[in-house]
Image (spheres, helix red, strand yellow):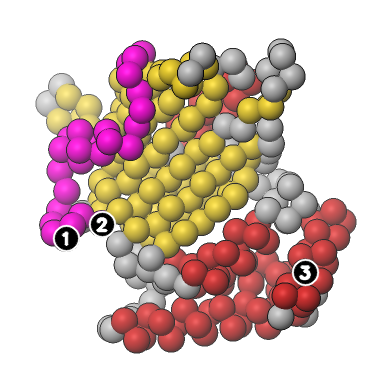
Amino acid sequence: MIVNLIRLFFLFQIILLVNPLFAETDKWKTCFQTHCITFRLPSNWYLTNRRSNGHSTKFDHFRTNSLKEESGREIIPAIVILFKESENKQILDPILFHLESKKFTLITNIRDYYNLQKLSVVTDNDVYKFIGMVGTFKDKEDTIVQHYITSTGDEFGFTILITCFESVFPQIQKDIKLFLESLSYEKRNSPWKLVSLNDQIRKSKELETTAQSRLKTKQINEITLALEELGDSCDLGSISSCELFSNLMNVGR
């Protein structure tokens, strides 16, 4: 099994070199259950890790290739998106969720507050979907810039952290501007009609098995479909699908 996966990774890398799957892709959509977050990023950003427990949390980690300081030290900026269901499964208040989720940010020096994705105007007050702030914190002698953004959808809350050393932040400033201006929340219909945990486990295994069969065909269109199926299987809680999906997304990086 391990030998087959290694061969598959080498094949996947060769295919990417000949015909890159994601070279033109700069629009992302990450979903969990009926909740989706979309955004745009330059193609030098990529998804490096995805994890999900299948029912209450999902974690996506995006990064760029390393950036160099004047000293030559290499720095890797990161964007993390966390989906989390409320513990009591009740509808979340966006302001309270923003305040309670500050435990995820290390910001000590707030530089600015902002809102994103205007929804409507009530009297003279604009209503927005995302609440954000940007600031800095210290890590020994280094200053770290961080954006902290939250939103809610029914019983789910979403936390986004963008983290980068201040020394290289100007190199990604346009990337972050693009991300923030394009950030959007939307709902979707549930892609599966699952009535029990056993149904969910069975569907997850079915998607993973189908994806593995597609990967063996060595066809670029089948590999693209396999990635979608592995991503869905991961969302349903398959640890092995999450690992394989993350590994394949990083081939050739």
* 21 in relation to 9, above or below: above
Marks 1,2: beta carbons within 8 A: yes
Q: Is residue 98 magenta?
A: yes
Under tag 3, what secondary structure?
A: helix
The amino acid at mark 3 is Ile
Q: Give the residue pinned by disc 1.
A: 89
Q: Give the residue pinned by disc 3.
A: 6
Q: Please give left or right for residue 13 compared with residue 214 in the image.
A: right
The amino acid at mark 2 is Glu
* 67 in relation to 156, above or below: above
Q: Which mark is residue 50?
A: none
Q: Is residue 95 magenta?
A: yes
The amino acid at mark 1 is Lys
Q: Give me the C-alpha separation between circle 1 and circle 3.
A: 42 Å
Q: Residue at x 81, y 71 (%)?
A: 7
**Earlier residue among tags 3 and 2:** 3
Q: Residues within 10 Å of mark 2 (few under 14, many from 20)?
A: many
In the image, residue 182 lies at what x, y percent? Answer: 47, 36
In the image, residue 29 lies at what x, y percent? Answer: 49, 52
Q: Give the residue pinned by disc 2.
A: 85
Task: Look at the image and give the residue range highlighted in magenta.
Answer: 85-111
Q: Residue at x 68, y 18 (%)?
A: 69
Q: Give me the C-alpha separation between circle 3 and circle 2.
A: 36 Å
Q: Please give left or right for residue 185 compared with residue 101 in the image.
A: right
Q: Residue at x 40, y 19 (%)?
A: 137
Under tag 2, what secondary structure?
A: strand
* 1 in relation to 181, above or below: below
Of badges 1 and 3, the one in the foreground is 3
Q: Is residue 219 visible?
A: no
Q: Residues within 10 Å of mark 1 (few under 14, many from 20)?
A: few
